[in-house]
Amino acid sequence: MEEGSDFPDQVYDTFYQNQANSYDKALGGFGKAPKFPRPVIFTALFQYYYRYKLTKPQESSHALEMCLFTLSQMYKGGMHDHIGGGFHRYSTDKFWHIPHFEKMLYDQSQLSNSYLAAYQITGKELWRWILFCRRR
């Protein structure tokens, strides 16, 4: 266990493996429909990326890719309200196309943190743009 760490490496590795096993490689997200945004999972995977990017480059890169691809799919799909801004509660289908028509304030704030982390890590303007569009 690293100095100052709250959890042993085994906890982080088990978490990563559980997420990797449930990850939908073709469409993004974790598990089957309905697909919920999981900002807490994104936060933990971003932390995994930062913690292990030098010692476990393959796993940490995969953790980052799972987040970025899922966030991208959510934005491109029907879960994102392209007219009014923000994100609907979840997608009723596995393709992120058909939203459940309600928006939760806590989802909006947590997803802002996820998209901000994506921007901070990659520097890609897409993530900044999504944050800008959310403000409406």
Image: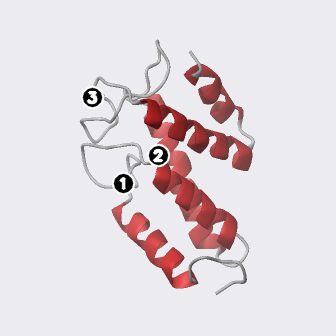
Taking the spot 44% from the left edge, 26% from the top edge, the residue there is 80
- Quadrant of the snapshot with the C terminus: top right
Left or right of 6? Residue 89 is left
The three-letter amino acid code for the residue at tag 1 is Phe
Which residue bears the numbered disc 2? 70
Mark 3 or mark 1, which is nearer the start of the sequence? 1
Front-lying residue, 75 or 113: 113
Q: Position of residue 15 (x, y in %)?
A: 45, 71
Using the numbered discs, state the Cα–Cα distance from disc 3 to disc 2 in whole angstroms: 18 Å
Disc 3 element: loop
Disc 2, disc 1: CB below 8 Å? Answer: yes
Residue 96: x, y in percent?
A: 34, 35
Question: In which quadrant of the rendered view does residue 131 lie?
Answer: top right
Q: Which mark is residue 100?
A: 3
Q: Kindly identify the amino acid type of the residue bearing the numbered disc 3.
A: His
Q: Distance from label 1 to label 3 (Cα)?
A: 17 Å
Location of residue 119 in the rendering, given as x and y in whole percent from the top left corner: 69, 41
Q: Quadrant of the N terminus?
A: bottom right
Q: Earlier in the sequence, mark 3 or mark 2?
A: 2
Nearer mark to the viewer, of 1 and 3: 3
- Color encoding of the figure: secondary structure
Q: Which residue is mark 1?
A: 30
- Taking the spot 64% from the left edge, 76% from the top edge, the residue there is 56
Q: Is residue 75 rendered to the left or right of residue 88?
A: right
**Between 53 and 1, the one nearer to me in the picture:** 1
**Residue 34, relative to residue 47: is it above or below?**
above
